[in-house]
Image (cartoon, grey):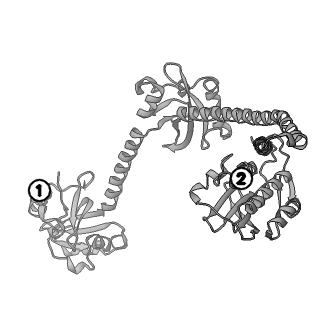
Amino acid sequence: MINHFSVFILNSPPINSILDGFIFNQAIEGMLLAGRDGKIIRINPACLKILGYTSEEELIGKEIEVAIPNLHRNQHKEHRNKYFRHPHPRAMGENLNLKALKKSGEEIEVEISLSPLETKDNFFVLAHVMDVSLKRKLQDQHLTNEKLLHSIIQNAVDGIITIDERGTIESLNPAAAYLFGYKPEEVYGKNVKILMPEPYHSSHDGYIENYQRTGERKIIGIGREVMGKRKDGSTFPIKLSVSEVIVKDRKIYTGIIHDISSMKEAEQKLKDYAQELERSNRELEDFAYVSSHDLQEPLRKIQAFGNYIQDREAANLSPKGKDYLNRMLNAASRLQKLINDLLSYSRVSTKAQPFKEVNLNKILGSVLSDLEILIQNQNAKILTEELPTIEADATQMGQLLQNLISNAIKFGKEGVAPMIQIESRVHEIEGNDMKRKWVSIEVKDNGIGFDLKYSEKIFSIFQRLEGRKYPGSGVGLSIVKRIVHRHGGNIEVDSEKGKGTTFRIYLPKKQAFKKVNND
């Protein structure tokens, strides 16, 4: 293999007249004329550019070895003399990795063809020179890309299968072979439908024929969930994506197969869990409602007989007996409040009403009217802004505002008149599908506040941070949170001990679904 740049020809000035034509000067490939002594006679502009020179004068009269890399320069003269003993048209460089030396010292890859020329007096050789450095780089890059693509396919965790227009399997990667339980040689040349259970098996050929005839796509370029069939006959769910490519005037279809068995199992477990949770919640709600309702009757009797004793038999009781009676009636009263709150909690679901347009200003007005005596007794001041109209359950919006306002009054600082501010804003938030308008309602007080480490605990049913220092059952904020979630919203709290509390509630202005219950 000759690893250099070779051109040589006899020196004869009359040959210049042959080379002064349009083709030599305007050719896009390099042309170089040299004599038997190896000296350059003519060189066209394209060849000058290839070798990095600006004018013929820089090279004319110099031996051709000036363009040969140093490593092959001495060897080249021997090859030149050998060529002239048997001159003939010759192509060089194809797969030979020939190199030329540029003026800058840079070595480039070239391809050369030699054409002997003979005149009456002399013998010449015309060399056609082509810089193939870029071509080689592209070839190397193409080879690298092919190796990279092969490596990606062979090591992909998803199965990859290629078929022809008739559905015949042409290749499959190790992941696909593992998924379906076949050795590659067991499926090469067979119809891909051997990897499909019914009804896909029977309809596949018709689908390919219909697609090629009409262009109607069912999977190609779309992807869908289907079932695969292993060698042992078992089936499993897969996500199949198919692409189409034209290779040498024929269509090739590439299928990427992702095993979604684990995902389907997880989805089913989640679905089963959700159904079980729904059933459990429904049973708990029914139990809470029935239990609290059934407790009402015996409790009424306890209270009735207790009041009867207090009204008619108090004179016959000792001081200790009167104390016991008062404790009993107080306990019955607390139990009555607890049962009523428990009923309210369960009714968020069991007695829910459909969502409709609700003017929150009217709801707030009714709530403040119901709390009028409490507000007057505590000398509370309520500052309100204009509230919006939203889609909601009107009764539950009343419960929500009443619980928050009464809660703010109840937990006021001793000796300080409660100050409660109610504000609202409308926000436009971009979701997964579209922009939706949301409403924020803020209820801020100047009460005792609490440590934010209890911010989750306060929404749990029957939780009371202050014990029995303040009246109540610890259900009010649980009801608020449940109402907010039923409306597809969210609730936040900000508080600092001794510096008041702020509740922020976010609700959609319009409901995505007009639901009644919590499901």
Q: Nearer the viewer, mark 2 or mark 1?
A: 2
- Mark 2 packing: few (<14 Cα in 10 Å), some, or many (20+)? many
- Image height of 480 relative to 190, above or below: below
Residue 197 horizontal/vertical position (percent): 59, 23
- Quadrant of the rendered image containing residue 446: bottom right
- x 88%, y 39%: residue: 313
- x 71%, y 52%: residue: 477
- Image height of 357 relative to 100, above or below: above
Q: Is residue 90 left or right of residue 195?
A: left
Circle on res. 203 = none
Circle on res. 477 = 2
Q: Secondary structure at mark 1?
A: helix
Work out which quarter of the rendered image holds the C terminus and state it.
top right
- x 73%, y 65%: residue: 442
Q: Nearer the viewer, residue 447 or 74?
A: 447
Q: Nearer the viewer, residue 101 or 326?
A: 326
- x 36%, y 56%: residue: 138
Residue 160 horizontal/vertical position (percent): 47, 37
Q: Is residue 435 left or right of residue 170?
A: right
